[in-house]
Amino acid sequence: MKNALVIDLEHWYSNEFLTKYLPSEKVDQDLEAVKPIIDLLEKYNVSATFAVLGTYAKRNPELIKKIHDKGHEIQSHCYSHKTLKELGKDAFEDEIKRSVDLLESITGEKPVGFRAPSFSIDNSTKWAFEILEKYGFKYDSSIFPIKTMLYGEPKAPVNIYKPCKEDITKYDSKGKIIEFPMTVLKIGINIPIAGGFYLRIFPLWFLKLGIRHVNKKRPVIIYIHPWETYPNTPRFKLPLFSRFVAYYGINSSLSKFEALLNEFEFSTINDVLDDYSCLSDSSVKSQNLMHENYSSDAVGK
């Protein structure tokens, strides 16, 4: 099965766990950190979705154009890295417009996909779908069907669906935006295996097992930040928990990432969605009827 691969292009200091401890002067490592990932994508002939932060694109327009020219998808990751709750509806719309205009000026194409900073679309920020629809987006990949201290909508479906504007945990066959939620392995509880910190913390054998199991029913989505795979990412003295989440597994994550590229088929989100049969209206209706089957990944189901 073809799975979706996302590279989050944002500054290393966008990490929420570093915010209170950052120096006034920050070292730029954008190009050095992303190059090994681009090299691996070329080695395995994989096209990926690059979720690009507006401030990152403004600083690296030539890199974004080069990535686009290589056949990768450019997705909006908003303009700043403020969460939707921090921005509010009006400021979010302003950031979306700035992001769309900037990315289009660099690539010649408007982005059709969106990823919210810190997965910050939940039922308290469901107004985001109105704005995404207004600016012509086709899909979103921001909903995480778990609950953490930073993000999550644990009752959201685990499969690709069209969210209801009144309650994003519900299906709407007439919805305009397609949601590709972050991948979880649902075995009684939702275990996140979508990448990022979860790629760094879980052993490779578990990630492979989880992807194979989810692939029996649906495609997975894997994401990674270049700073998570770059050994020279600056380290700061942080509280124990913050240090663990920010830095654990950085030295081994690139080899894990390559192992997944070697074993599974990946492509852009847009490409995977085009292939995924649930996107037709008739199959969405069928999907609603089979919600219970799609909501569980339990072994034996």
Image (cartoon, rainbow, N blue to C red):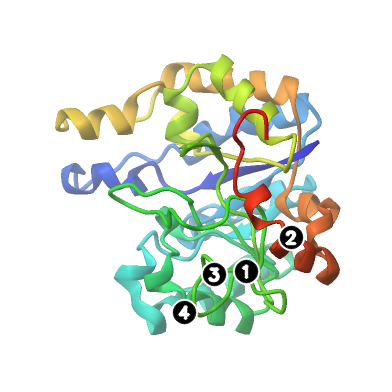
Circle 3 SS class: helix
Q: Nearer the viewer, mark 2 or mark 3?
A: 2
Q: Which mark is residue 99?
A: 3
Measured from the top left, where is residue 228 in percent x and y? 44, 31
Q: CA distance from mark 4 to mark 3?
A: 18 Å
Circle 1 SS class: loop
Query: Could you tell which of marks 4 and 3 lies nearer the N-terminus?
Result: 3
Q: Nearer the viewer, residue 207 or 240?
A: 207
Q: Which residue is mark 1?
A: 171
Q: Is residue 88 above or below residue 56?
A: below
Q: Residues within 10 Å of mark 4 (few under 14, many from 20)?
A: some
Q: Which mark is residue 127?
A: 4
Residue type at mark 4 is Trp
Q: Nearer the viewer, mark 4 or mark 3?
A: 4
Measured from the top left, where is residue 195 in percent x and y? 52, 35
- Does 251 sit left or right of 107 as displayed? left
Disc 1 + disc 2, Cβ < 8 Å: yes
Q: Nearer the viewer, mark 4 or mark 1?
A: 1
Q: Which mark is residue 287?
A: 2
Residue 75, quarter of the rendered image: bottom right
Q: CA distance from mark 4 to mark 2?
A: 24 Å
Q: Residues within 10 Å of mark 3 (few under 14, many from 20)?
A: many
Q: Quadrant of the N terminus?
A: top right
